[in-house]
Image: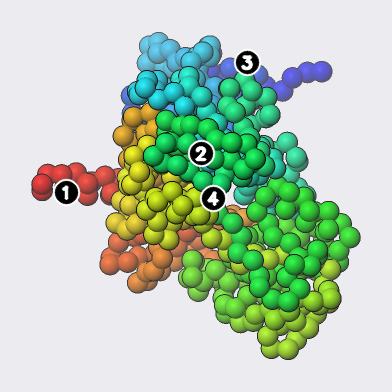
Amino acid sequence: MEQTIPAGPDLTLGVGPEAFVGGKLLGHVGNEEVLLVQGRDGVFAVGPYCSHYHAPLADGVVVENSIRCPWHHACFDLRSGEATCAPAFSPLDAWHVEVRGGCFFVFTKKETKTVAQPAANTSVKNIVIIGGGAAGFAAAEMLRRLKFSGRITILSSETSAPVDRPNLSKDYLAGTAPEEWLPLRSESYYLDADIQLHLQTEVTRVDTAEQRVFVKNRGSLSYDRLLLATGAEPIRLEVPGANEPYVHILRSLADCRAIIRAAKEARRVFVIGASFIGLETAAALRTRGLEVHVVAPEKRPMARIFGPEMADTIRALHEEHGVVFHLGQKVASLADGTVELANGEAFATDMVIVGIGVRPRLALAEQAGIAVDRGVTVNQFLETNVPGIFAAGDIARWPDPHSNENIRVEHWVVAQRQGQVAAMNMLGARKAFNAVPYFWSQHYDIPINYVGHAERWDDIEIEGDLRAKDCLLRYRRDGRVCAVASIFRDAANLQAEVEMERNTAAKQVLRIRAV
C-alpha cells in the first residue's frame, strides 16, 4: 500500500527563513510531520500535535523557548519536547535543526526529552501523597521525572487508577470517547516507575509530630514529605427520595459507568444543577438521545461565573439541542420516580443526576491541626503551616499573584499544575506557584476557555458575536482585566494568559525595586 507523504516542505531539503508564517512552519521528514518553530534562541523542530488531545500546535503561541497548546494550554519545551506544564505529560518528539547557508535542515530526532533538573534535596527518601486525582498523579509523575529515587506512595480512595476526570462529564459520558482515553497512565506505568498506588484506601489520620499516616485496617506508614491532595466531594441533595437507586452523582469513573448503564434503559433524565457538571452532563446525555430536563435555583445558568450575556448564550445553546430548563426552581422531592418541584409541578423520570457543587475534603487537615480557611491554607510554595506538609488541588487556598487574593478553585488543570510545583518544592526547589488559573468547558461541540479568576467584576467587554459562537469576553475590575473567556478564539485566549503572566511579573519586579 502506497504511503501518503505529509503536507508541507521536505525539511531534509532545507527551508529559508522566508518560509515561516507567524514563526511556525509545518513540514515533514520522510513520512513524519514536523513543526519548525522560531523560538527566542533559534529555530527548533518538534512534533506538531499536543500529546494531550492532539491539538495542532501550529495554532498555538510561542513564549520564549516554549510552545503552548491552543486547546487546553499545555506547554512544551522547544529544545527537548518535554511537556513542562499540564495537562500534557507525554513529551513531543524533538529534532535536530542544522543551519547551512542561512537555511534550516532537519534530519534526525533528539534522544533527550527532558530538561527537568534532578532532585535538589537528597535527604528526602519517602514521600506520601494522599489522593489519587489530578494533583496527586501530577506530583508523583513529576517526582520521577525529577529523578527522585526514593519511595512514592499514593493513597487513593478511588476504585480506579487516576483518570482524565473532565472526560467523565464530556465525551466519554456522551459515548464519543473510547475507554483507552481515560487513564492518565497505564497500570504498567506505576510498576515501571516504582510508584506504590493503593486504591480503595481510607486514611484515618495524620500524626504530624511522628510524621506518620494512618490507614484504615492497614496500620500506618511514615513520610519525609506529605502532599494532601484529597480533592472535593459532591454535595448531596437533601430531599425525600435523594437516596433512591435511580439518583446519581458524577465524580468518579465508577459514577460515570453507573450513569452510562442506567442511560441505556432510560428515556427521560432530570439534571439537578446548572453549573459545569450539570450542563456538561446534560449535553452528554442529549447526545445519547435522552430527554433532558435541568432544574436550578438561578435565573441564568452559570451567570455567576460568566456573566449574563454568556449565560444566555449557554442556555440558548442547550435549548437548541432540546434541553428543557426549569430555572428559578428547587427540587422538593424525588420519591417514587417523580421529580416534584417547589412550585408544585411534578414530572415522571427514569434517572436523576445531582450536580449541585462540591466541597473540599478538609477533615484530615483539620484533624492534623493544619491551618484551614475554606480550604487548606498554603503559602506561595504550596506548603502548609506544618513544615514538610504540602497541599494541592481542590483543597488548596493559595496566594494568587494575579488577583492579589487568596483563592481556591476547582479546576482540573490548576490541580495538575499545583501537583507538579508541589513535587518540585517537596524536593527543595522553592518554586512559587504563579500559574494563571485556567479551565475549559464543553457543551456539545462548543468549547469555552477561561483564564484568570474573577469572582466579581465591574464590567464585561465583549468582542465578537456570542450568537455566532465566535467571541472573547474580558472581565475587568478596577480597570484591570482579571479574566478572559472565549469561544473558538483559542489563540487570543492563550495570548491573554501570557499577558496576565507578564503583567504580574512586571508588578513583582516593581515591588522588589520599591523595597
Nearer the observer: mark 1 or 3; the answer is 1
The CA distance from mark 1 to mark 4 is 34 Å
Tell me the amino acid under the disc marked 3.
Answer: Gly
* In the foreground, 84 or 484: 84
Residue at which label 2 appears: 213
* Coordinates of residue 170 in the picture (x, y in percent): 67, 52
Q: How many circles with numbers are drawn on the protein?
A: 4
In which quadrant will I find the N terminus?
A: top right
Q: Mark 2–mark 1 contact, CB under 8 Å? A: no
Badge 1 or badge 4: first in the primary sequence: 4
The CA distance from mark 2 to mark 4 is 17 Å
Tell me the amino acid under the disc marked 4.
Answer: Gly
Nearer the observer: mark 4 or 3; the answer is 4
The CA distance from mark 4 to mark 3 is 46 Å
Nearer the observer: mark 2 or 1; the answer is 2
* Coordinates of residue 64 in the picture (x, y in percent): 35, 32
Badge 1 or badge 3: first in the primary sequence: 3
Q: Residue at x 67, y 50 (%)?
A: 252
Residue at which label 1 appears: 511
Judged from the image, the secondary structure of the residue bearing numbered disc 4 is loop
